Image (tube, rainbow, N blue to C red):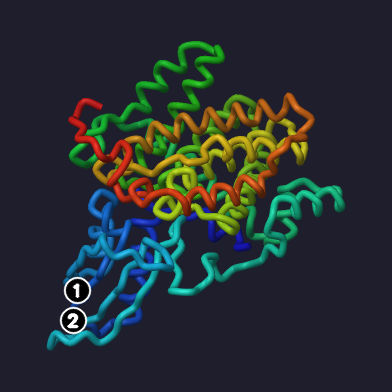
């Protein structure tokens, strides 16, 4: 599996696969073709179907400036390798096409070529299932975060500290803003209002309200094209920072404990990415919010004192109860139902962690099995429910009263 440095990425929303991935691809093609007079970019499948709402054309054009770029939308063409395909074409001053590059945005901001392994180039984890990792931990009397430390180099902690700082900043920035998000939906920011209501007392309801507020803050930042961390994607970016911010506040967590929890979340996300998918265009929202919820649940179980088996159970339960979740962004914007869905998943992650802590950690369906089930469910799902905005909630014409 890849380093966690390939999973957690800092960048601008609203979509890791539709915005961050194309931006990375455009930067590379621009650098490799400095003499091009202009560019042409063909967008395929899901990348074309919801590209307008996800700002795909905008980020490509901005990245390739000052050269002019022609965007060709081809939603009807779905490449066998992955639905998020794009072809970059360099054009000389006489209008001749001099070079082309077919590349795919496979989720979490990762780009790969046809036939290339879905993971990145920094593959440092020899074990690729939760069962193998837990056996290693038990044999070596280690915790999951210690397995991460064994596989990564010493710079992982400085990296995770930067990731956490970026997550904290996205919470604070989101809480400071009001008004409506960009786009025709005119979706109102709600995080600040939730926070004002939540801080009234120290009840359980207040605590949940703060989790909602912190998660909404990040998800609203993402929906508005703000700076967030893929966790594991932009579409699920609010879940981990929203819950971890609240847990840190509630339990006065040290920096070390916070980063260890983040390392465990990353390990869980890596296992899902390796054995299934984190791409909404490939697996539906179960692959994004479901994966983010599993990552957050395992993280929370660790922070709350869970054993290896209880952490695995929490992650399994969180993903299991998102199976079949569709990706149906209204208007192609990462706003409805994405923002609210992040908030609900953050609390569900905490509930899964608490549930697992009431058990001895033994359960019937393993994390590895539910990951494979999620992968198969994504394959079985109709394309209308996988980030094309052709099915589910996206079918309906919603007015501005959200």
Residue 64 in the figure: left or right of residue 275: left
Q: Label 2, on which residue?
A: 37
Can you name the residue that lies furthest to the left here? 94
The residue that label 1 is drawn on is 67
Q: Is residue 335 left or right of residue 161?
A: left
Residue 387: give its label.
none
Label 2 element class = loop
Q: Position of residue 102 (x, y in %)?
A: 35, 75
245 lies above or below 376:
above
Residue 209 appears at what percent x and percent y?
47, 21
Up the image or down, 171 lies above or below 150; here it is above
Task: State the residue in front, 117 or 75.
Answer: 75
Q: Tell me where residue 310 sits by quadrant.
A: top right
Q: Position of residue 205 (x, y in %)?
A: 51, 15
Q: Position of residue 77 (x, y in %)?
A: 29, 65
Mark 2 or 1 closer to N-term?
Answer: 2
How many numbered discs?
2
Drawn side of residue 296 relative to residue 230, left or right: right
């Amino acid at each position: 599996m890849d380093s966690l440095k390939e999973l957690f990425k800092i960048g601008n929303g609203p979509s890791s696969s539709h915005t961050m991935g194309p931006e990375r691809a455009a930067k590379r093609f621009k650098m490799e073709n400095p003499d091009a007079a202009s560019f042409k970019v063909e967008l395929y499948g899901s990348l074309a179907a919801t590209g307008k709402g996800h700002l795909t054309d905008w980020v490509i054009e901005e990245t390739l400036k000052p050269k002019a770029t022609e965007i060709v939308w081809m939603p009807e063409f779905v490449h066998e390798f992955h639905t998020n395909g794009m072809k970059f074409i360099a054009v000389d001053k006489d209008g001749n096409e001099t070079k082309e590059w077919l590349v795919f945005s496979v989720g979490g901001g990762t780009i790969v070529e046809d036939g290339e392994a879905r993971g990145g180039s920094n593959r440092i984890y020899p074990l690729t299932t939760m069962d193998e990792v837990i056996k290693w931990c038990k044999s070596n009397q280690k915790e999951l975060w210690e397995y991460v430390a064994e596989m990564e180099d010493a710079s992982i902690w400085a990296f995770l500290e930067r990731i956490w700082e970026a997550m904290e900043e996205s919470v604070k920035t989101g809480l400071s803003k009001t008004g409506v998000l960009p786009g025709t939906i005119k979706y109102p920011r709600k995080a600040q209002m939730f926070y004002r209501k939540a801080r009234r007392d120290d009840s359980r309801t207040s605590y949940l309200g703060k989790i909602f507020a912190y998660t909404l803050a990040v998800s609203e930042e993402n929906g508005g094209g703000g700076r967030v961390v893929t966790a594991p994607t932009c579409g699920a970016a609010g879940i981990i920072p929203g819950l971890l911010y609240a847990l840190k506040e509630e339990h006065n967590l040290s920096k070390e404990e916070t980063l260890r929890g983040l390392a465990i979340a990353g390990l869980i996300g890596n296992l899902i990415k390796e054995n299934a998918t984190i791409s909404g265009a490939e697996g539906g929202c179960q692959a994004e919010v479901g994966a983010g919820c599993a990552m957050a649940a395992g993280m929370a179980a660790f922070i709350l004192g869970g054993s290896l088996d209880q952490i695995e159970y929490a992650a399994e339960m969180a993903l299991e109860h998102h199976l079949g979740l569709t990706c149906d962004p209204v208007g192609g914007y990462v706003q409805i139902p994405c923002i609210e869905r992040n908030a609900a998943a953050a609390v569900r992650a905490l509930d899964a962690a608490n549930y697992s802590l009431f058990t001895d950690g033994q359960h019937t369906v393993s994390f590895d099995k539910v990951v494979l089930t999620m992968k198969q469910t994504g394959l079985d799902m109709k394309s209308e429910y996988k980030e094309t905005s052709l099915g589910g909630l996206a079918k309906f014409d919603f007015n501005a009263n959200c």
